[in-house]
Image (spheres, helix red, strand yellow):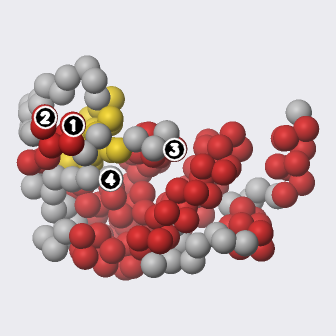
Amino acid sequence: MFFPLRSANDEKQLTENSIKAIVSIHSGPGIHNFSDKYAVLHLTLDDSTEENVTKHFTTVNSFVHEFRLRKENVLIHCLVGVSRSVCFCIAYLMTVTNLNYSNAMMFIKKKRLCANPNYGFRKQLGKFGEKLILEEKRLFFENFAKTQLDNLIELYNKDCLFANCLPLNDESNIITFLSILGYKKEEKEKDEKV
């Protein structure tokens, strides 16, 4: 995943980074006219503490993950690359790894020192991590993992490698991860027989 706006304006940089999809988060008029070679998800959101970003987490997570499963790069951008885009990167990391909000924020901050979601976004991310994350992971798993379990585990391990979290390197860790998401080994075997 890549951000901020500067990258979105630079066709050469998009090409060099093999960007195939773009999440564009801003409230102004169409800032970009991306060429048809990019899949674009546009969210009209202000960088306001009152803005409800939580309701968009599932949509953005699914969009980003669809391309990552195909090993394609995604740009998430807003106007400055400090608050909105960072918020959605954190939500995605929380969903696909075992990082909580604080650890996901520290991970992003190491990569981008100016990362600083506004107070309202931070509150929503905290609540997302405390109350909504297991349901988000379950839905996420239902949408992606039944058909692409190996890719999901590979991406999870790759994300964990960079985020210093527990990788799924043996069957007991994988079964624990899947059981947290409500998926049982017998269901996988039954799905494979069909």
First in residue order: circle 1 vs circle 3 = 1
| Dot 2 amino acid type | Glu
How many neighbours does mark 2 have within 10 angstroms: few (below 14), some (14-19), or many (20 or more)?
A: few
Q: Which residue is mark 2?
A: 11
**Of tags 2 and 4, which is closer to the observer?**
2
Distance between the alpha carbons at the discs numbered 1 and 2? 6 Å
Q: Which residue is mark 4?
A: 1
Q: Which residue is mark 3?
A: 69
How many neighbours does mark 3 have within 10 angstroms: few (below 14), some (14-19), or many (20 or more)?
A: some
**Are the residues flagged by discs 1 and 2 in contact, CB closer than 8 Å?**
yes
Distance between the alpha carbons at the discs numbered 1 and 4? 14 Å
| 10 vs 81, nearest the viewer | 10
First in residue order: circle 2 vs circle 4 = 4
Q: Position of residue 180 (x, y in %)?
A: 70, 67
Distance between the alpha carbons at the discs numbered 2 and 3? 23 Å
First in residue order: circle 1 vs circle 4 = 4
Q: Position of residue 9 (x, y in %)?
A: 9, 39
| Dot 4 amino acid type | Met
